[in-house]
Image (cartoon, rainbow, N blue to C red):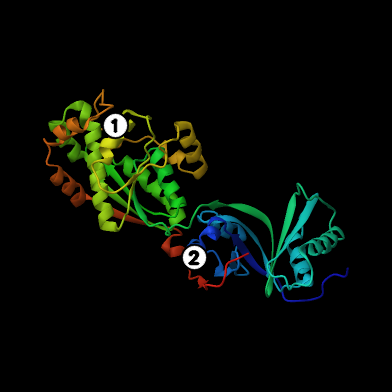
Amino acid sequence: MADPGPMSAPKPIVVVHYHEISLKGGNRPLFLRRLARNLADAAAGAGVRRVRRLPGRLVLDLAPDADPSVVRSRVATVFGIAHFAAGYAVPSTLDAVKTAILVLLAGRRFPTFRITAKRTFKVFPMTSEAVNRELGTFVLARFDTRVSLDDPVLNVHVELLPGEALVSVDRETGAGGLPVGVSGRVVALLSGGIDSPVAARRLQKRGAEVEFVHFHSVPYLPATSQAKVRALVARLVRHQLRARLWLVPFGEIQREVVLSVPGPLRVVTYRRLMARIAEALARRTGGLALVTGESLGQVASQTLENLSRVTEAVSLPILRPLIGSDKEEIIREARAVGTYEISIEPDQDCCTLFVPKHPETRASVAAVAAAESRLAVDRLVESGLAGASVESFTFPPEDARAPTELECNDRSDRT
């Protein structure tokens, strides 16, 4: 087979595939538009010229000077993606595909390989198997390698679409889940510990946009917990690109609880007040639920009875995505998502202030009602809201952003 003749240079791309979105039926266009928007925002300033929707996939068209590794690192943070790979877009002809393969494989050593070709339209003159054989023979004639269909070192993916072919290698697993923004908004109580960032990220992965709220005890304690949660939100904002952190002063509220509530019931009372304040913030910001990092039985405040008392304090749902996870599972996930090292930095937060030695583990409805009857609950909630400040986070930073063209259409997205 002769080498392909001169033709226009292949166009650099990153091709993105999704999975769960394809199961959404009539809502699929909505999910895809949001995924395309999130990809465009995540890749801002990284040399992505355009995000295109094609049947069964999205394509990021790169500028000639773009760094594909930077683009891939951005794409890896976007929920809703099954897998993605850097490559080239060329005309849908074998000669053009061969040119792209030569460019992709230049300078690489790979003892084994395979070609994985897929036709998304059946008018292409060759079957996928025939394309595999033709391109495999082409690679064998030019590189010191052999074919391995079961466990290749290098897998060259060729996607034959109407009007163009996408050729890529080094396919990477995506973050999975659903695009952030398709499942509404929630308010996550972020303590600065290990659990709550993992819980918030799980809601992001299910398509929820998260507002973060942190309760601090300045001036009774140093501001170290605030610095930690800022770092945590800066990490988590990579998945939703824009986020807000509400900082609520809680020390004075705790002081009033200490003066009026019996010691064993103080922790449950603190948490009920936090939930009420978070609910008020959710009403203000359009949140549909609260999120906590609680795990059943992990500490005294997380027994079924105490969790029930907190749930009863508000009318919004309280989502507890870690409820059945043990500490080791949560730590492994925190390490994997990059929040663990931040969370274990030493600090003092409101959970360490005015905490009794022997908190109640099975608070009853009557006992909690009696304790709260000694408090001006509505006034305490209002004081928390009045003292709250808000900070905004973006990723990439605003000064690094550049416009990315977003091509949206509602053509069929069947593969």
Is 23 situated above or below 195? below
User: What residue sits right under mark 1 in the picture?
Assistant: 305
Image quarter for residue 98?
Answer: bottom right
Q: Residue farthest to the top?
A: 358
Percent coordinates x, y for residue 202 in the rendering: 44, 47
**Circle 2: is it few (<14), some (14-19), or many (20+) Cα within 10 Å?**
few
Q: Is residue 207 left or right of residue 391?
A: right
Q: Amino acid at mark 1?
A: Glu
Residue drawn at the location 31% of the way across and 55% of the way down: 287
**Gap between marks 1 and 2 measured at Cα:** 42 Å
Percent coordinates x, y for residue 356 in the rendering: 24, 26
User: What residue sits right under mark 2 in the picture?
Assistant: 26
Q: Amino acid at mark 2?
A: Gly
Instruction: In this rendered view, identify the residue nearer to me: 278 or 77.
Output: 278
Nearest to N terminus: mark 1 or mark 2: 2
Residue drawn at the location 46% of the way across and 54% of the way down: 239
Q: Is residue 184 left or right of residue 400?
A: left
Q: Residue farthest to the front?
A: 25
